[in-house]
Amino acid sequence: MYYAIDGNTASSVQFFLTDSTNHYFRAALYFNERPQYDSIQPVINFLKKDIDMMIQTFKWNNNK
């Protein structure tokens, strides 16, 4: 599940991955600055490609 939140928010990108039984992974993108959506939008667009790739290629490590 991928959330893209528009506007001046503390975190405009959040997502989680799960296999519904044993694993859960949550991540969020935060900037260490006061949010200015119009200023950070190009960066978010750029990073979204990397986040999408990470989600598509994510594999659980089942070694215990």
Image: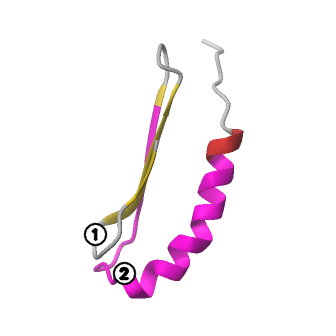
Q: Dividing the picture into quarters, in which one does residue 50 lie? A: bottom right
Would residue 61 appear left or right of 1 to someone viewing this image? right
Give the vertical position of 58 relative to 27 (above or below): above
Would residue 43 appear left or right of 28 to someone viewing this image? right
Would residue 39 appear left or right of 8 to someone viewing this image? right
Asked if marks 2 and 1 touch (Cβ < 8 Å), the reply is: yes
Q: Which amino acid does label 1 sit on?
A: Thr
The question of residue 49 being in magenta is answered with yes
Residue 27 position, x and y percent, is: 45, 47
Q: Dividing the picture into quarters, in which one does residue 59 lie? A: top right
Residue 49 position, x and y percent, is: 65, 62
Label placed on residue 57: none
Residue 55 position, x and y percent, is: 62, 44
Residue located at (31% from left, 78% from top): 35
Which residue has dot 1 on it? 9
Give the vertical position of 28 relative to 17 (above or below): below
SS at mark 1 in the image: loop
Give the vertical position of 45 relative to 63 (above or below): below
Q: Dividing the picture into quarters, in which one does residue 11 lie? A: bottom left
Residue located at (56% from left, 72% from top): 45
Tell me which secondary structure the magenta stretch mostly adopts: helix
Which residue has dot 2 on it? 37
Task: Tell me how far mark 2 sits from mark 1, CA to CA.
Answer: 8 Å
Residue located at (47% from left, 13% from top): 21
Q: Tell me where the magenta segment starts and ends, as one range.
A: 25-54
Quadrant containing the C terminus is: top right
**Label 2 neighbour load within 10 Å: few <14, some 14-19, many 20+:** some
Give the vertical position of 60 relative to 16 (above or below): above
Q: Which amino acid does label 2 sit on?
A: Tyr
**Label 1 neighbour load within 10 Å: few <14, some 14-19, many 20+:** some
